[in-house]
Image: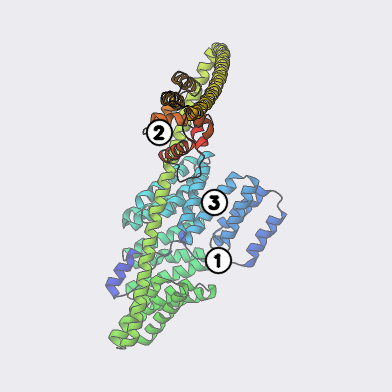
Amino acid sequence: MMRLQNLLNIVLRKTGGLWFTSFFIVFNLFVNAKEANSHDSLEYFLSTSSGLEKKVDLIIDFLDKPENQYLENAPDYALRAYKISQQAEYAVGKINAMIKLGYYSFRSSDYKSAMEYAQNAREMAEDLNLQKELAFALRLIGTIYNEFGDYNNSSGYFFKSLRIFEKIGSKEGISQALGDIGMDFYYQQDYTKALDYYYRALKLANELNNPSLIKRQYNNISNVHGDLMEADSAIYYLDKAIIINQKLKDHLGEGTNIMNIGFNLLNKGEYNTALQSFGKAMDIFVKLNNKTRMAECSLNMGYCYQVLNKVDECIKSFSQALAIAKELSYFRIIYMASQELDKIYTTTIKDTIKAYKYILLEKLANDSLYASQNQKQLIKLELQYTYDKKELLRKQAQQKKNTLMLILILSLLSGIVILGLALSRFRLKSKFVFLEKERIKAELNIKKRELSVNLISLIRKNEMLSEVSDELINLEKQAKGIEAKEILELISRKLRNGTDDKMLEEFTVQFQEVHAGFYESLLKLFPDLTQNELKLCAFLRLNMSTKDISELTGQQLASIDKARYRLRRKLGISNSDKNLVSFLSQI
C-alpha cells in the first residue's frame, strides 16, 4: 500500500494542494508484467527435475530474482512451493515458501495471513535452529508492525534480524536489515539516523554488487532528501535507480522513479518539466496497464495544471484520476481528486450543482478512508493480542520443557544410584497392594452378600408381619366382644406400624460399609436432605423397587412415589429425563 510521505505536507503548504507519493521497491504492492519465456523456462526446469526438494528450491530462486518479484502469479508459485515442501516434508523449503506467502499477503493488505505465515515460519525456524530463515521471518514480522506504525515492535524485530545476519555473516541480510531499521527512523522523521542506516546498507549492497539492494537504497535515500526539500539530491538518486531498473527490465520501478522525479521537480517549481516527467511515467504505466499508478500520475498532473492555472487540463486530469480510482475503489485518490474538482467548480467555474456532486464523493471517500484506518487499527490490536497470547503460551511451553528436562536429568542421575532398591521396593509394594486389594475385595463381597441376605430377610419379615396384620384385621371383624376387638385392633396397629429397628440399624451400618462415603457425598452436594430421604436414597442406590421399599418400611406405595418425586426435586432433576437410580449410582 502506498504511504503518503511527510513531503506531502510540505508540498501542500507550499503549493496549496500538491500530492507526493514515495516508492519503496521492497514494499511495492503492484505487479510487474513479465515476458512469457520466464514462466516457460521455470516450468521446463520443474518438469525435468525429479526431486521434490529441487522443485521447491527452483521456485524460490525464481521468485528471488529482481525481475520476478512483482509477477502477477508470484503468490501462486509460492503456494505451489509450499504444497510441494509439505508433501516432501522439506522444512527449509516450507519456511521460505511461508515467508514469500507472508510478503505477498502483506502487499495485498491481508495482514492477518501475513502475520500467520510469518509467525509459523519463525516458530519452525526456531525449532529447527535455522538462523538465516529465522532472520527473514523476523524481518517480515517487523515489516508488518512498521505498516501499523508500531515502530517499537518493528525496530525490535529488525534489530533481532540484524544480529542474526551478523552472526551468520550474511552481508546481503545485513544490508536488508539496515535498510529496514533506516525505514523505521524515516517514518519517525529522524532523517539523520535514517540516512545513516541507508548509507550503511548501500555500502554493503555495492560491495555485493547486488542491483536489487542498491536500487532499494537509492529510492530510500531519495525519499529522505525529498522530505528535506532537497530536490536535486533526491533526483540524483532517482536517476541512479532508473539506470538499474532499466538494466533489470523493471519497468514498473522505472516508471515510479520517473514519477517521483516529477514530484521533486514540482517541489522546485519547475511545473512544465514536472509535467514532462509525469507524461513519461504515464506512458509506461499505460503500457503496463497499471491503473493504480495511472490514477496517481493523473492526479499529480492535475496539480501541475492547477498551479499553471490551466483549468481545462486540470479538470481533465483530475476527472481521469477520479474515474480510474472509482474503478479501483482507491479511496485516497477519489477523495483528493473530488476535493480539487469541488474547489474548481465552486470557486473558479461557480457551478454549484457539479461542485455538490464532488462534495458527496469527497465525503464518501473520506468516510471509507476513516473506516479503513479503523479496521487497520483493529487488525493491529487483534494481531497483537493473538501474538501476545501465542508468545505467552510458547514461553510457558518452553519453560515447562526446560523444567521437565531438568527434572529428567536429575531423575536419571538419581535413578542410577537407587534403581536396584527402588525396583525391589516396588515389587514388594506391588505385592502388598495386590494382596490388600484382594482382601478388601473379599471383605466387600462378603458384606454385600450379608447386606443382600439381611435385606431379603427384612422384606420377608415385613411381608409376614403384613400377612399377620391382615389376619388380625379379619379376626377383629369376626370378634364379638368389645374388649377382644380392641385387643386385636391394638395388636394389628402395632404390627402395621412397627419396624424392626435393630435390623434396620444393622442394615444402615452394613450399607455404609459397602458404600463408604455415600451419605457424606450426598449431604455435601445436597445438605437439605432429611434422614428419611437419605434412607430412601440408600434403598434406591441398591436398585430396590417401590414395592420392595414399601414392604421393608411399611409405607404405602403412593407415599413412596410422592417421596421419590420430592427427592427428584431436591436433587435438581425433576425437569429432566435422568433416571433417579442411575443418578444416585454415580455419587
Residue at 41% across / 69% down in the picture?
260
Residues at badges 3 and 1 in contact (C-beta under 8 Å)? no
Quarter of the image holding residue 309?
bottom left
188 up-or-down from 406: above or below: below
Mark 1 or 2, nearer chain start:
1
Residue sitting at x 49%, y 50%: 118
Hey, which residue is sitting farthest front in the picture? 480
Can residue 175 be seen at all in this image of the molecule?
no
Residue in view at x 38 percent, y 57 percent: 378
Which residue type carries mark 1?
Answer: Lys
Depth order, front residue of 511/462: 462
Question: How many C-alpha atoms fall within 10 Å of the one at disc 3: few (<14), some, or many (≥20)?
Answer: many
Tag 2: Cα neighbours inside 10 Å, few (<14), some, or many (≥20)?
Answer: few
Element at label 1? loop
In the foreground, 174 or 110: 110
Amino acid beneath label 3: Met
Answer above or below: position of 148 versus 557.
Answer: below
Q: Which numbered disc, 3 or 1, marks the residue that appears first in the sequence?
A: 3
Q: Which mark is residue 249?
A: 1
Residue type at tag 2: Leu
Camera-side residue of 273 and 140: 140
User: Total of numbered circles in the picture?
Assistant: 3
Of badges 1 and 2, nearer the viewer stands 2
* 160 relative position to 461: left or right: left
Residue 146 or 558: which is nearer the viewer? 558
To which residue does mark 2 refer?
Answer: 525
Point out the frontmost of discs 3 and 1: 3
Q: Is the C-beta separation of discs 1 and 2 under 8 Å?
A: no
Q: CA distance from mark 3 to mark 1?
A: 27 Å
